[in-house]
Image (cartoon, rainbow, N blue to C red):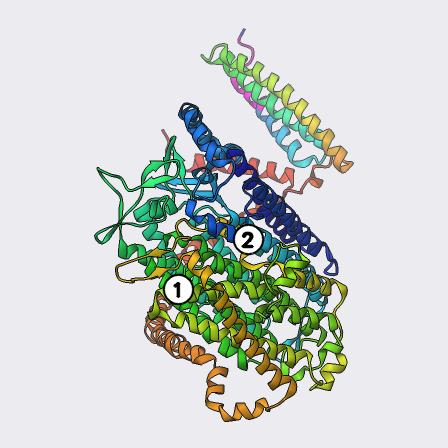
Amino acid sequence: MEAIGLQPVLFVSAVLFVCGVVCMTTKRNGIGILMGVELVLNAANLNFVAFSRYTSLGLDGQVIALFVIVLAAAEAAVALAIALNFYNNHLTIDVDRGDELRG
Amino acid sequence: MDSLGYELSWYLRIAWLLPLLGFAIEVFGGYWGTRKTKTAAYLAIGCIAAGFVLSTVAFCRWNAETGAFSHSGEAAVHEEHASLRHIPFAGQAAVADHAEGHAAEHAEHGSGEHVHGEHASDGAEHGGAQHDEHHAEHQSIAALSGTIYTLGKFGDLEVSIDYYIDSLTILMFMMVTFIATCIHIFAVGYMSDELTEDYVDHFAHTSDGHHVHRPGRFYRFFSYFSLFSFSMLGICFAGNIFQVFVFWELVGICSYLLIGFYTERKSANVAANKAFIVNRVGDFGFIIGLMILWTYCGTFKFGDYEVDGHERPGLFSMVRGHDGELAQQGSDVILKTHGHDGHWQAPQEGESKTIPYTLLVVAGLGVFGGCIGKSAQFPLQTWLPDAMEGPTPVSALVHSATMVAAGVYLAGRFFPVFTTEVLLAIAYVGCITLFIAATIAIVATDIKKVLAYSTISQLGYMMLAIGLGGWAAGLFHLITHAFFKSLMFLCSGSVIHGCHHEQEMPKMGGLRRKMPITAYTMLVGVIAIAGLAIPGTGQLMSLLTFGAVDKPLAFSGFHSKDAIVATALAYTQLNPLHFLLFLTPLVTAGITAFYMFRLWFYTFAGDPRDHHVYDHCHESPKVMWVPLVVLSFFAAFCAANGEQGSLFGMLSFSEPVGLADGMTATGTAAIAVPSHHAVHDVHGTAGAVALLAAVLGTLTAYLLYCRKVVDPENIRNQFSGVYNFLVEKWQFDNLYDAAFVRPSHSVARWCAACDRNIFDAILHGSVKVCIWVATIDRKFDEGIVDGLVNLIGNVTRSVGLSLSVFQTGRMRQYVMFIAVGVVTLFALLFAFMPKA
């Protein structure tokens, strides 16, 4: 079944990636940024899976995609904890307010 | 016997150490929060009085065992033929001890070593018993000696704390503790104006002309007093010459502290320095003597001792043996190292230890040099009058009764080691001293200075007696003099206290109406020192005391001076060449009576000369006059019955061996020392002429200063040359000033100039070079090294600062940077990467 080739998948992946980056750059809400990160990660995942399907990469790409999902879950847990703490300290999750470390 | 020495040493040891304890508490306890408390005084008095009680106990024990005190001097003379002064228990004991002896002794000493080792850890507990040695067993010498504690052993040199107890030691302990107790009590009254937080010293001025204000030093005074008592008792207790030297120096430093007690007064400082430095001159000789004796004899100990179970002779036995003779062989003296049980002889065969005769003389002279310094004898007598700068109780305790007596005591203690040449030197030194000091005392007007010169003069008498072989007579005078001189010093203290620190006799006069107790106790002292007696009252005294006393009615000074003059007369009969040794003390006896009565008439009799002083003076409080009364009793009666009396008997009990029968020496000084019989034979004559001299002196003083038959002023003008010579103290101070002080000052100035112009110049020059080099070095450091380091730092910092602009803290911006950066990187990659 030669339904779709590699390019369409890469295209979807690029769109997802750009969406994620745009989300990260425009959202002031910390949770929103996290969502953007998830989009970026999933775009990468999609690339891995696609390359493993269409090239001679074999199962490696899919295994790495699984790793990325696990890492993303761990990262989300940590990031949500940071968000909660951030809220405790600032009574908001607007990331622009967290600028104490600016030079 | 062992046990007696052990027991006595414990009594005396505690009596000796108690003042040290007092001193420690007074020093560390300070003034207990306030300077107005007398606690320190009570503590010091308690210590010294307890010492007196213990000395008395020791005295009673000694007397009970030896019968020395109840044994009259005259009897000693008669028993001389038997050549023993029996110690009742000793003679028999010695034999028995020997029989059962050695086995036990060896056993003891097997463990003796062991105990020796323990010394360091468990203190002196066992040491005394182990090393007790008992000369008294040896029939001839009545002394107990032993070691308390061995401080250290350096090769052959053993430094230890020993004791040497005989009648002299015990009498010195009694005398020192008793007189010190009296003076301590007196000082509570005399020093009471120090009981304040703000003491005004009227004799010291600050640079702006005001009187010096300082806190009172009552407690300090008494702590010094306690230290002094400890040191003085240490000298008497000491069983080796090195130990004597240690306490000798301690006494010296106490004297320094006490003379300079009013440390704000320049004169007091100068006097303290003078006393200390002049004493060093004498001590230099002392050290030379010590070195010679140790080099040749190998020990410092006075008495015999034991090493590893073997008996060894002490210094006295080594030089004199048991018969008191020097074993001369050519120009050497053989040391008596052979024998046992105190019968020491020169070895018959084999190696014998010898000491060159000349060195023995030098050693004797050296040790006597120490005595000269301490006892203020010619030519080192100049420090004592100046030492009157200290408070009067100090003068009484330190510079009349005890410290200066230490010199005489040592001369007496070390008598066995002195050869005839040394004895002759001692006699002449004493003779010169007693005359010079007495003549100066005639013209002195300061009440304390008169007493100071009379002290020097009386010390001269003692030295003279010892030099003439009148051992017991000299030390007899030491004891009696201590009583009446401390009495007179305390009386003068009472006068000075009553007259608000006025010391000049011309401003006094008639004081006996204002202070009767002081005046009449002083009179007792004056009569005692003048040596007055009522002739022909011997019979009366005999009746009154049921035959116990058959000497004429007289105070202590008569008896002791009598004994000295008699010795001198007997000596002169044997050695007509040295007739001055009799004439001078005889004449001086008259001078003594004259100046002492002059002092009394000047101060207490006649009409007041200065009404300001007279109106303000008052009798001293009870705490001050009670000691006067007590001391005056002893000054009067301590020598009761003279040479038949108990005191003299006790002293002659411990007399060096062989003196009683006289000595004859050939060689460089062909001198014969009179036997006791010879002295006894001329006693009547000597006593009569001495009394005549004293009466003449007294009469002259009475006529001049009481009856005013001739105005002393006229005599003074008539003999102004002599008068000025005497006022200038025979020019001694000027002589020493010219001979030693000024040369050393000019040498010092020269050295200072040298220092300033040469050494300082070199130093300054090198310093300048150093500074110049350092300046350059600094510029290099600051400009180049520091500049480089700073530059790196500054660049790093500015780069950091400029980069920190990007650190905005805005997360979305960072993401933008990343995104734009990635895009830019890709763009660049595509644009510039070579196409494959």
Q: Label 2: few (<14), some or many (≥20) within 10 Å?
A: many
Residue B176, percent from left and from top: 58, 55
- Give the magenta range: A2-13
The answer to whether residue A63 is left or right of residue B22 is: left
The image shows residue B573 at horizontal and vertical percentages of: 38, 66
Instruction: For mark 1, name the chain.
Output: B
Is residue B388 something one can see in this rendering? Answer: yes
Q: Report the quarter where the C terminus of chain B lies.
A: top left
Q: Position of residue B585 (x, y in %)?
A: 46, 71
> Given the current orientation, which residue lies at the most extreme top position?
A1
Q: Is residue B437 visible?
A: no
Instruction: Give the foreground label among 1 and 2.
Output: 1
Say what secondary structure mark 1 lies in: helix
Answer with the quarter of the image where residue A75 lies. Answer: top right
Nearest the camera: B50 or B327? B327
Q: Residue at x 64, y 38 (%)?
A: B811
**Alpha-carbon span between mark 1 and mark 2:** 27 Å
Q: Which mark is residue B417?
A: none
**Which residue is nearer to you in this view: B295 or B138?**
B138
Give the label on residue B172, or none.
Answer: 2
Give SS at disc 2: helix
As for residue A8 lying within the magenta part, the answer is yes
Quickly name the residue at label 1.
Answer: B571
Residue at left offset 45%, top offset 61%: B681
